[in-house]
Amino acid sequence: MARDGARGCAPGPIELWGGVECSVVRIGDGYSSQFDYGGCPRPGDIDAFAALGVRALRQPVLWERVAPRGLRDADWRWPDACLQRIRALGIRPIVGLLHHGSGPRHTSLLDPAFPDELAAYAGAVAARYPWVLDYTPVNEPLTTARFSGLYGHWYPHRRDPPSFWRALHAQCRGIAQAMRAIRRVQPRARLVQTDDLGRTYATPPLQYQADFNNHLRWLGWDLLYGRVGSDHPLWSWLVECCRAQPEDLLWFAAHRCRPDVVGVNHYVTSERYLDEDPERYPPECRGGNGRHRYADVEAARVLSPPSAGLSALLREAWSRYRLPLAVTESHLHAPREDQLRWLAETWRAVERAREAGADVRAVTLWALLGSYDWDRLLTQRRGHYEPGAFEVRRGRARTTAIARMAAALARGDPPAHPVLAQPGWWRRPSRLLYARAAPVPGPPEPGPQPGARSAPILIAGAGTLGRAFSLICGQRALDHRLLARAELDIADPAAVERSLDACAPWAVINAAGYVRVDDAETDPERCFRENVLGAQNLAAACARAGIPLVTFSTDLVFDGARSAPYPEDAAVAPLNVYGRCKARAEACTLDRHPGALVVRTSAFFGPWDEANFLAHALRALRAGGRFDAADDLTVSPTYVPDLVHACLDLLIDAESGIWHLASGTALTWAEFARRAARMAGADVAGLRARPHAELGLAARRPRYSALGSSRAFAMPALDDALARYLREGPPAPRIAQAGPACAPAR
């Protein structure tokens, strides 16, 4: 990364960089920090980053966290430990001082003293770590100025062009002064300047607004480069609308702080489309500029064909600045296969940009430890988590398929996974919620050819769970084959072999089996055949073929002696035939196929099944009828769509062993019905909580069988699942009353 920049295509292979999402934004009088949720990397995590082949790491040394009350009270312990480990592992740190922040409480983006104070902090950081060469003093200054000064999302919550300019000016001048302070300590220090880079498209009447937006996206870099003079396309707007003083604009030309690397942050949301017919779009997409009312939506939801994508944007940035480039953020909030597709497409886009002569040095794996609450732009603290290369839960980091693909890319291997045969959602026809034809600059990024098929996932069993897997695999563009019992009897070894030969799957999901808990007491042979022999046959055949297998078990493998949720390693002690068969099936499966994924779950409910416990309860209570439910059996209800999504993510991540997946709340069947009915607005007067002994159940049940987990993974919470279940619309009332009910078949 020479200070002089590059004059041709990038030397050497593409580097893999890494970064942790570390935003600290002020909302009113409080702060929202990613690290408050446990996403703070520890020195041990850095070893895991290094194992991926990460050559450079965007390491936060954030002003608000290190010195919230000033440099005299600075707490350097955490950055000391991290940077020491980074240095020992031979990784280059790219130190960040502000990440969407506005500084400690005593300052803000509108404070005239902000640049001087940031520079003082930067000088202290450089003095403490004089060996560090690469810095990003302020991440995404333009984006932060928009969110804080134009849109009002973050402090100081302004919505006017003058505040936008003051926030951008403070940050960019702060960057220039910070780098000057850093270079007094380390003359070879380099500036890696990041911002979001996208493009705006529009219907013809709004092309003028799209042109303005497409000039504005460069403004932060232009200021630092010293390119903003009276001939700049935005000069008049800055002076007249933003009330920028000409001397403040020209200061940057006199104090050039040209980036050594232009850091491009790119997301699906980076590319926008403006439409002068806002009524075609949801209310949250509508806005205007004082001249026109219009809708502002993701271009991926409108453009057909898709936009030219990241490769074209990188070539555009190279043509504009002739400086080395790096993709410094590239993340997608999506199921795992689309995250893999996004990473693979990003890497290929960089390869194509380099082939066209652009000096693109690296792709940054972002966010290594995932991120929290970006679905609400950090304005609400809900703890909504998006996994990254590692999934962080319960104090540990779990490697995902993203990390494995990144490690392969770092080694020089091409991206490879069965899911890559299909395009990401941003390229599938289903993305087009508001399709319009519009010109785009150049052909779109190449991807899988229409109709291309990968090896499928074979789903054995077309009951409630199998049909749910089939539906969600279709939504997620995962090729699959659903085989009912008439097509595949898993208890017949020859039938299993024939199906594997015919389908040639890359994975198998066993959603078949005997599910009638009480009937199993009088039909143990059939329960054993379907649940033990069937699971055993699938495991043996998949192991011989080297095929990943997912199979299911139950909370009924436990005896209920505990009063706290059962972890995965708890001893099994089933009380009934069904539970004994499932416990035997677990052991047989893992004995024959140690790489299998065995998922224990409990108390299904979902929007596509009218026979589950909750559907019966709500039908009865909404109709004013009676409904009996056990008040002495504690379970952990599981929302079927969440279960299916979780299992598919874990399958793609190549996880194995026993996992507990449930919606995270322990409660009795009666409490479950009451909670759902109240959320649905149904009268609970007809709900009768009764001991399970009065419900006429043939099979013994454990009094307590709630599932807990020690794994670094969690499904959405029960209340969130219930809200979505009710929005989906459980079956309408059809009967006036229902008889006794306890646990549905599993």
Image (cartoon, helix red, strand yellow):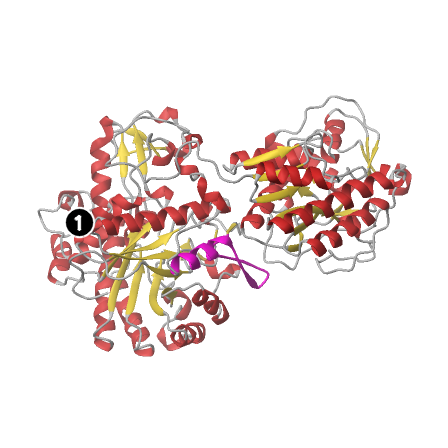
Image quadrant in which you'd find residue 234: top left
Q: Position of residue 190 (x, y in %)?
A: 24, 67
Q: Quadrant of the N terminus?
A: bottom left
Q: Is residue 404 magenta?
A: yes
**25 or 344: nearer the viewer:** 344
Which residue range is magenta in the image? Answer: 387-410
Q: Which residue is mark 1?
A: 319
Identity of the residue furthest to the left in this view: 231
Q: Residue at x 48, y 59 (%)?
A: 369
Residue 651 percent coordinates (x, y): 58, 48
Residue at horizontal 76%, vertical 49%? Answer: 585
- Whether 738 is drawn above or below 107: the answer is above
Res 576 seen here: yes
Determine if the magenta segment contains residue 505: no
Which residue is drawn at the image coordinates 10% and 51% (left, top)?
A: 229
Judge from the rendering whether residue 124 lies leftward or rightward of residue 343; answer left or right.
left
Label 1 residue SS: helix
Residue 43 location (% of width, % of height): 47, 71
Q: Is residue 93 above or below residue 325?
A: below
